[in-house]
Image (cartoon, rainbow, N blue to C red):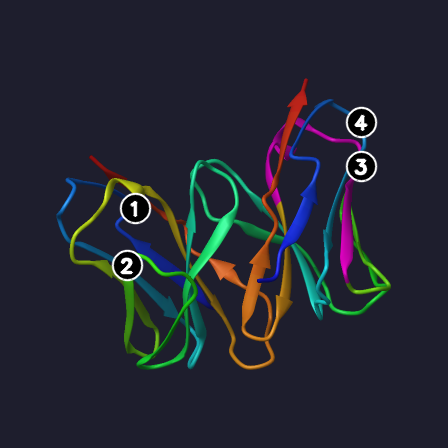
Amino acid sequence: SQTIHQWPATLVQPVGSPLSLECTVEGTSNPNLYWYRQAAGRGLQLLFYSVGIGQISSEVPQNLSASRPQDRQFILSSKKLLLSDSGFYLCAWSPGPGANVLTFGAGSRLTVL
Amino acid sequence: GQQLNQSPQSMFIQEGEDVSMNCTSSSIFNTWLWYKQDPGEGPVLLIALYKAGELTSNGRLTAQFGITRKDSFLNISASIPSDVGIYFCAGFNGNKLVFGAGTILRVKS
């Protein structure tokens, strides 16, 4: 069966420090991968999605970047965190073209101080 | 961009009552999904709807994909305390899933 892992679960970082959140999916190949951000426990905002290795689509201009170095690995990064980067970050996957149900990871809570 | 309008924003109901929430959009979607999120966790899929007019049940949950493909509703019958959480509708078109702002459900026991 397929599983999605996301880490770290919680992170407290100072302003200006770098960020790396990692997400991996097991039990499938060539998934679509997604990063969402959720602020204040409400709506989910799509940040990035990827349909294949090295293919990243950005949805909103921001201080973050994403990379997909391997088929089932998706990384969210920042060189210098801002206070406004605080939030709950969710990785998700779907089986690929034509498949339209997303399965989410457990989330990473980022607090920037 | 595509937006989903989800209502109500929050509900505070008595245990045993039925609950109804809905989503509307100005855009057509080819799939509607309903997720539930417990505090500090990722959303979990409740029901997926793939055809206009489709009515699907999952236990005490029932959801429908509107005929116009621009709306969907979710009903929860006989609510229980563990139904608390945030419920999200989501519409899928292409490679992206667009979420509503969520409905916070609180149940009085």
Q: Position of residue A111 (x, y in %)?
A: 26, 38
Q: Which residue is mark 3?
A: B77
Q: Which residue is mark 1?
A: A85
Mark 3–mark 4 distance (CA, rounded to whole Å): 7 Å
Q: Secondary structure at mark 3?
A: loop
Q: Which residue is mark 4?
A: B17
**Which quadrant of the view contains residue A98?**
bottom right
Q: Nearer the viewer, residue A45 or A33?
A: A45
Q: Are marks 1 and 4 in contact (CB under 8 Å)?
A: no
**Which quadrant of the view contains residue B29?**
bottom right
Q: Are marks 3 and 4 in contact (CB under 8 Å)?
A: no
Q: Secondary structure at mark 2?
A: loop
Q: Are marks 1 and 2 in contact (CB under 8 Å)?
A: yes
Mark 1–mark 3 distance (CA, rounded to whole Å): 38 Å
Chain for mark 4? B
Mark 2–mark 4 distance (CA, rounded to whole Å): 43 Å
Mark 1–mark 2 distance (CA, rounded to whole Å): 8 Å
Q: Residues within 10 Å of mark 3 (few under 14, many from 20)?
A: some
Q: Position of residue A10 (x, y in %)?
A: 27, 42
Query: Of label 1 and label 2, which has the lower sequence position?
Result: 2
Mark 1–mark 4 distance (CA, rounded to whole Å): 39 Å
Q: Is residue A56 above or below residue A84?
A: below
